[in-house]
Image (tube, helix red, strand yellow):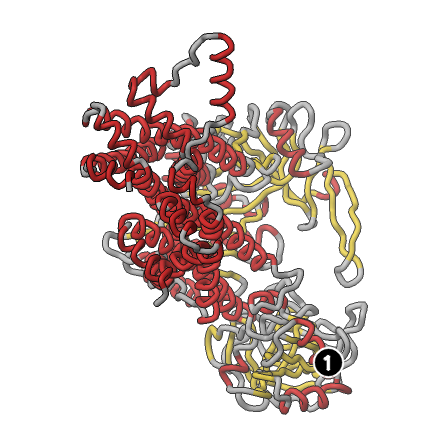
């Protein structure tokens, strides 16, 4: 061990307090930097896993024409760069007509997946396979699996020559006939089929919608029939999904794919490749994640260099005499620099490994404790047993963090090491390097000499007398170290107040969303949609029939108590002058552009939303509105106008009262379902109709008089107005639409079903005590799927999960900010202790002289308290000022989308002040303890040597 190495280690042992504080600083900065990177890599891995789960693991997809299929599939089977490959042959397309008037009239026919490379699970994981609702997948020739929407439907010949037909209402075991070989031309017309075959229905699945990601999704057709693999002799084309290995860049994958699939004649899974590190213009999420890491990491590095650099500056300053003596004895500048850098290496060997371990352990604990929040982030919902995301970080990344932390440590020590090598031996021995007046002080002295007027006393001197003067002089001499302490304290204050602002404004945003109906009020709700296409009367009657079905579902699930079902739909109506407010006309114009629904006189013609409620609910709502339950004339249908809507104005959400003084309305049954009402130039109403042309890709608009387009009409009387969304309608989304809304008794729909287009039923549920919301919600979904069939589709909204998801995400964000705040506060504590302890060590002779001339313990206390108070006041002052600015910026960003008033989180402000006072209080106590331990004789003797 060399002389300078021994000297360095002895110096570290001798100044244990400074050494421990510096090591702690290295541990904190390394742990925080490691934590940020480990969190980012874990989130990136989770995003990759979620993408594979929801979109499949395929990297390359292509539609292979018959001429190229054999060659390409052969390559995929044998190519060493292929991890997994799967294909499906498309047997053709079929059109159909049905008794249920299904909206989609084109059916694709494809085979079940065939494994080309890899295991069965690997191949099926390339794309998202459909969920089998009942029955099974086809396994033998002449078996077929259909979408669940075909259950109970009879397919009939539509005369196209390529039509799918069934032997009656389709059920398991039914027979359907499918044309094979019919292709679509560029105009969407079907060619003649090569043959027809009969198939036995063996299963039903839930339809899918995203081409390439979902196995049954097609761009050309909305539904797909799946037949068994290898049950097609002449496919019209083949779909192929592939995952590769050994190709680390996007260009490498392109170069591999071009000879197999043709130059650019294929699709790449951009999102997946981005998460796998093959960046492209599609990798915005990863760019954002890397940007976050860069920004936060940069802040940490700057803070670490400032804090650790301050420690080494202190170390050099307290050993200036020693460096001067070493220089006078022949030590070179290089040897002096190496002495300080070796000190950094010794501290790093202890602090960096501990910091890495602490950072990884902290991230693992945070990910585990925030499992529900990360489930909410990744899945937009919660399960009963949220798993969160695991800690994922490679050894290479850990090594990179260690190297980065070591470089930060060396960068922190370099400037102090350079200063140590430049110390003059004579000045160091005299300890004159710190005795230097500032330019401001020099100017003040010159002015006093010229005018004969003494400089004005500083604030600390006026408050604390001679001790204050001494404190002021010391603060001037150590201004650089003082600035570091002040900045650290100010940053801690800013981050603590910011975390409070996040808590305050996120909570208010959730409250506003609840008031506007953006969040459902019930614990769990069931919504059943009737998707059949028919005349309004037929649809409305079928929807009323769903009320009985959902009431039957309610009794099948334990732990839930249902409220009265609400039937929702729309109507076409005209309202007289004065019905729409000026704010409402502006609102409608903002949403509809060239609005022709609301007139300048407050009249209206167009669509409106309506919710039909049972008699008890209707009575309660009328009582709330102070209105009668029946119309005064005894013949028209009663209604309540909902006079509150959410208005997205310039990206800001606020409430608007669209109605003026509505008294009555006329509701119409229009001959064409694609029609809507508009006002004509004379104040009357006309009907606008959209007419499709060709294969549905284009169309024209035509306008006719209301007399020529109306089948029937009825009158409505508004018996009152609701100025807020009632609790009973909290699950209907009435206020979040761009249309005017009203509430009516269900008896009106039952009496006049043809006047309304009722399409859905909503049932709110309350949770019985002790029932699990997740298990109960899953049971409700299973019961609804087993009961609802035909053209109806059931959805369960687990509002508990949605609320917990929001709370979890907000809580996670607050947790991360709070962790960062606490670490910065700890760094501030380290800086304060370092600065104060060194101040005492460097001022040993000064303290000894002051004691020898009579400055007692009380004077020392006042001097040290004045110094610490200066740090505290400046740190709090700057911190609170910047906190207001940061909170204002956060409020500005948030209020651009939500109407919020500005407010500071006063509780967190008080907490920040208390934290700074506590830190400085402990620092004062420590400084006093050190000062009392000084020995006057030993201090003066040491200086004399």
Q: Residue at x 67, y 67 (%)?
A: 105
Percent of width and height locating residue 259: 74, 83
Which of the two residues, 214 or 126, is positioned nearer the viewer here? 126
Q: Say few, some or many: other residues with alpha carbon within 10 Å of mark 1 (under 14 / 14 to 19 / 20 or more).
A: many
Q: Which residue is mark 1?
A: 261
Which of the two residues, 306 or 535, is positioned nearer the viewer here? 306
Q: Residue at x 34, y 67 (%)?
A: 1
Percent of width and height locating residue 295: 53, 50
Percent of width and height locating residue 502: 42, 40
Can residue 639 be seen from the camera position used here? no
Q: Residue at x 65, y 79 (%)?
A: 109
Element class at badge 1: helix
For the C terminus, the quadrant is: top left
Q: Is residue 446 above or below residue 797?
A: above
Which of the two residues, 554 or 933, is positioned nearer the viewer here? 933
Q: Is residue 430 above or below residue 134?
A: above
Image quadrant of residue 142?
A: bottom right
The number of numbered discs placed on residues in the rendered structure image is 1
Percent of width and height locating residue 391: 40, 65
Which of the two residues, 366 or 661, is positioned nearer the viewer here? 366
Image quadrant of residue 356?
A: bottom left
Q: Is residue 786 above or below residue 526?
A: below
Image quadrant of residue 467?
A: top left
Side of 111 where 411 appears, left or right: left
Q: Residue at x 41, y 62 (%)?
A: 784
Can residue 687 be seen from the camera position used here? yes
Q: Is residue 178 above or below residue 374?
A: below
């Amino acid at each position: 061990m060399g002389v300078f190495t021994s000297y360095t280690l002895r110096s570290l042992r001798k100044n244990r307090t400074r050494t421990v504080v510096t090591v702690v600083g290295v541990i904190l900065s390394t742990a925080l930097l490691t934590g940020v990177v480990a969190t980012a890599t874990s989130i990136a891995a989770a995003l990759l896993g979620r993408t594979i789960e929801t979109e499949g693991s395929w990297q390359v997809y292509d539609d292979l024409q018959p001429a190229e299929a054999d060659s390409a599939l052969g390559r995929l089977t044998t190519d060493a760069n292929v991890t997994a490959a799967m294909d499906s042959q498309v047997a053709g397309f079929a059109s159909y007509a049905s008794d249920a008037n299904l909206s989609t009239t084109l059916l694709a026919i494809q085979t079940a997946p065939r494994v080309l490379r890899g295991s069965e699970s690997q191949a099926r994981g390339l794309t998202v396979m459909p969920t089998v609702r009942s029955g099974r997948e086809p396994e033998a020739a002449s078996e077929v699996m259909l979408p669940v929407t075909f259950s109970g439907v009879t397919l009939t010949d539509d005369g196209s020559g390529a039509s799918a037909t069934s032997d009656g209402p389709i059920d398991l075991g039914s027979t359907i006939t499918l044309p094979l070989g019919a292709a679509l031309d560029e105009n969407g017309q079907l060619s003649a089929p090569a043959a027809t075959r009969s198939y036995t229905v063996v299963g039903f699945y839930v339809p899918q919608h995203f081409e390439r990601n979902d196995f049954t999704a097609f761009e050309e057709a909305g539904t797909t029939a799946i037949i068994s693999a290898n049950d097609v002799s002449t496919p019209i084309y083949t779909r192929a999904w592939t995952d590769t290995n050994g190709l680390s860049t996007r260009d490498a994958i392109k170069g591999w794919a071009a000879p197999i699939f043709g130059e650019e004649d294929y699709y790449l899974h951009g999102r997946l490749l981005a998460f796998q590190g093959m960046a492209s213009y599609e990798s915005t999420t990863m760019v954002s994640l890397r940007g976050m890491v860069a920004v936060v990491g940069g802040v940490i590095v700057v803070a670490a260099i400032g804090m650790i650099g301050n420690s080494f500056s202190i170390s050099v300053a307290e050993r200036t005499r020693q460096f001067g003596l070493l220089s006078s004895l022949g030590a070179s500048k290089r040897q002096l620099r190496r002495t300080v850098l070796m000190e950094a290496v010794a501290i790093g060997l202890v602090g960096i490994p501990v910091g890495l371990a602490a950072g990884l352990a902290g991230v693992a604990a945070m990910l585990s404790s925030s499992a529900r929040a990360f489930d909410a982030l990744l899945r937009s919902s919660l399960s009963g047993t949220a798993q969160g995301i695991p800690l994922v970080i490679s050894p290479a990344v850990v090594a990179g963090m260690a190297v980065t932390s070591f470089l930060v440590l060396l960068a922190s020590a370099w400037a102090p090491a350079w200063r140590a090598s430049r110390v003059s031996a004579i000045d160091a021995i005299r300890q004159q390097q710190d005795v230097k007046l500032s330019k401001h002080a020099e100017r003040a002295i010159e002015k006093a000499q010229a005018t004969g007027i003494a400089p004005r006393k500083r604030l600390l001197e006026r408050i604390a007398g001679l001790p204050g003067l001494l404190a002021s002089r010391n603060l001037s001499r150590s201004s650089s170290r003082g600035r570091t302490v002040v900045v650290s304290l100010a940053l801690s204050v800013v981050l603590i107040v910011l975390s409070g602002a996040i808590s305050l404004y996120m909570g208010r945003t959730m409250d506003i969303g609840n008031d506007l109906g953006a969040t459902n009020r019930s614990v769990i709700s069931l919504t059943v949609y009737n998707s059949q296409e028919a005349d309004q009367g037929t649809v409305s009657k079928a929807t009323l029939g769903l009320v009985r079905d959902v009431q039957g579902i309610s009794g099948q699930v334990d732990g839930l108590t249902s409220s009265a079902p609400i039937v929702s739909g729309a109507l076409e109506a005209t309202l007289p002058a004065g019905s729409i407010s000026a704010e409402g006309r502006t609102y409608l114009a903002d949403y509809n552009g060239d609005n022709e629904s609301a007139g300048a006189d407050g009249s209206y013609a167009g669509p409106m939303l309506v919710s039909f409620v049972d008699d008890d609910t209707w009575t309660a709502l009328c009582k709330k509105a102070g209105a009668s339950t029946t119309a005064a004339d005894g013949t028209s249908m009663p209604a309540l106008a909902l006079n509150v809507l959410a208005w997205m104005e310039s990206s800001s959400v606020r409430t608007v009262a669209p109605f003026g003084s509505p008294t009555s309305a006329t509701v119409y049954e229009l001959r064409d379902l694609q029609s809507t009402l508009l006002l004509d130039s004379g104040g009357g109403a006309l009907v606008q109709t959209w007419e499709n042309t060709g294969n549905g890709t284009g169309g024209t608009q035509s306008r006719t008089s209301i007399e020529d387009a109306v089948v029937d009409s009825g009158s409505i009387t508004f018996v009152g107005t609701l100025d807020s969304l009632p609790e009973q309608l909290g699950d209907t989304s009435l206020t979040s639409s761009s249309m005017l809304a009203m509430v009516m008794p269900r008896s009106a729909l039952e009496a006049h079903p043809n006047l309304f287009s009722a399409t859905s039923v909503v049932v709110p549920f309350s949770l019985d005590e002790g029932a699990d919301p997740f298990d109960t919600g899953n049971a409700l979904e299973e019961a609804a799927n087993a009961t609802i069939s035909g053209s109806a589709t059931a959805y369960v909204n687990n509002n508990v999960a949605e609320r917990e998801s929001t709370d979890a995400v907000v809580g996670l964000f607050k947790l991360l900010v709070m962790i960062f705040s606490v670490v910065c506060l700890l760094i501030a504590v380290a800086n304060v202790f370092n600065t104060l302890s060194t101040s005492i060590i460097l001022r040993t002779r000064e303290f000894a002289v002051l004691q020898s001339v009579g400055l007692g313990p009380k004077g020392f206390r006042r001097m040290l308290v004045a110094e610490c108070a200066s740090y505290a006041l400046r740190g709090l002052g700057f911190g609170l000022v910047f906190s207001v600015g940061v909170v204002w910026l956060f409020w500005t960003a948030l209020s651009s989308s939500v109407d919020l008033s500005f407010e500071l989180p006063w509780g967190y402000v008080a907490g920040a002040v208390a934290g700074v006072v506590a830190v400085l209080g402990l620092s004062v106590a420590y400084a006093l303890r050190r000062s009392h331990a000084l020995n006057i004789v030993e201090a003066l003797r040491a200086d004399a040597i």
